[in-house]
């Protein structure tokens, strides 16, 4: 971790999520990921935007020609933790696309014009990642977490549900396996 990130993280934790300098007043969270190749835990300060059901973060890397390492970590290990203010929340990350991405990205550029500058500096499309709380647990032999949107239909009786799963991860995979599972909802 760079000294610059370390200083921001220390300031964030010492001041209940508030930092000064160039991030003064900006919504900032600490994103905990697992290294895609190393498997080591990583922490990165990133700006966020509240969105319906979670938070959006932006893999801008200040307009660099490549995505930040934390973005590759999210793709490999979408279960993450985020420190937001004084709270720590388990989240599931997914890459926004289409209209959802455009809407969130346009709002971020309007609120923080520096992001429009980052976009102009690079030829890549800056990924928008949505972090959603990991609330829905499905038990099937071992515990698995699924996004609340990852199933399209559930028939439930006596605590057991038949779930019809929709595509999770890559869009348009057409996957729809079914299995009997016990739902456990956690706050």
Image (cartoon, rainbow, N blue to C red):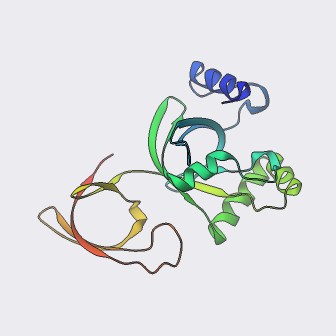
Q: How far from the left and from the top, in percent, is residue 34?
A: 52, 43
The part of the image, by quadrant, that contains residue 120 is bottom right
Q: Is residue 34 visible?
A: yes
The part of the image, by quadrant, that contains residue 18 is top right
Q: Is residue 56 visible?
A: no
Q: In percent of the image, x 66 and y 46: which residue is there?
A: 69
Q: In percent of the image, x 40 and y 50: which residue is there?
A: 134
In this image, 91 relative to 45: left or right? left
Q: In percent of the image, x 62 and y 21: which residue is there?
A: 10
Q: How far from the left and from the top, in percent, is residue 60?
A: 74, 50
Q: How far from the left and from the top, in percent, is residue 28?
A: 64, 37
Q: Is residue 141 above or below residue 150?
A: above
Q: Residue furthest top?
A: 14
Q: In percent of the image, x 50 and y 51: which residue is there?
A: 77
Q: Quadrant of the N terminus?
A: top right
Q: Is residue 134 above or below residue 18?
A: below
Q: Residue furthest front?
A: 38
Q: How far from the left and from the top, in percent, is residue 157?
A: 14, 68
Q: Residue furthest bottom?
A: 174
Q: Is residue 45 above or below residue 91?
A: above
């Amino acid at each position: 971790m760079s000294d610059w990130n370390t200083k921001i993280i220390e300031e964030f934790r010492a001041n209940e999520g508030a930092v000064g300098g160039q991030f003064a007043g900006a919504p900032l969270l600490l994103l905990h990921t697992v290294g895609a190749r190393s498997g080591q835990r990583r922490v990165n300060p990133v700006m966020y935007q509240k969105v319906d059901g979670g938070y959006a973060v932006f893999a801008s890397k200040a307009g660099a020609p490549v995505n930040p390492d934390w973005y590759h970590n999210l793709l490999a290990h979408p279960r993450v933790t985020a420190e937001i203010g004084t709270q720590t929340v388990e989240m599931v990350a997914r890459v926004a696309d289409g209209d959802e991405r455009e809407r969130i990205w346009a709002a971020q550029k309007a609120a923080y014009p520096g992001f429009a500058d980052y976009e102009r500096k690079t030829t890549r499309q800056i990924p928008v990642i949505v972090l959603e709380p990991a609330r829905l647990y499905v038990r099937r032999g071992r515990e698995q977490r699924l996004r609340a949107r990852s199933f399209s239909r559930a028939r439930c009786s006596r605590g057991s549900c038949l779930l019809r799963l929709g595509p999770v991860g890559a869009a348009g995979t057409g996957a729809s396996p079914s299995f009997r599972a016990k739902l456990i909802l956690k706050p």
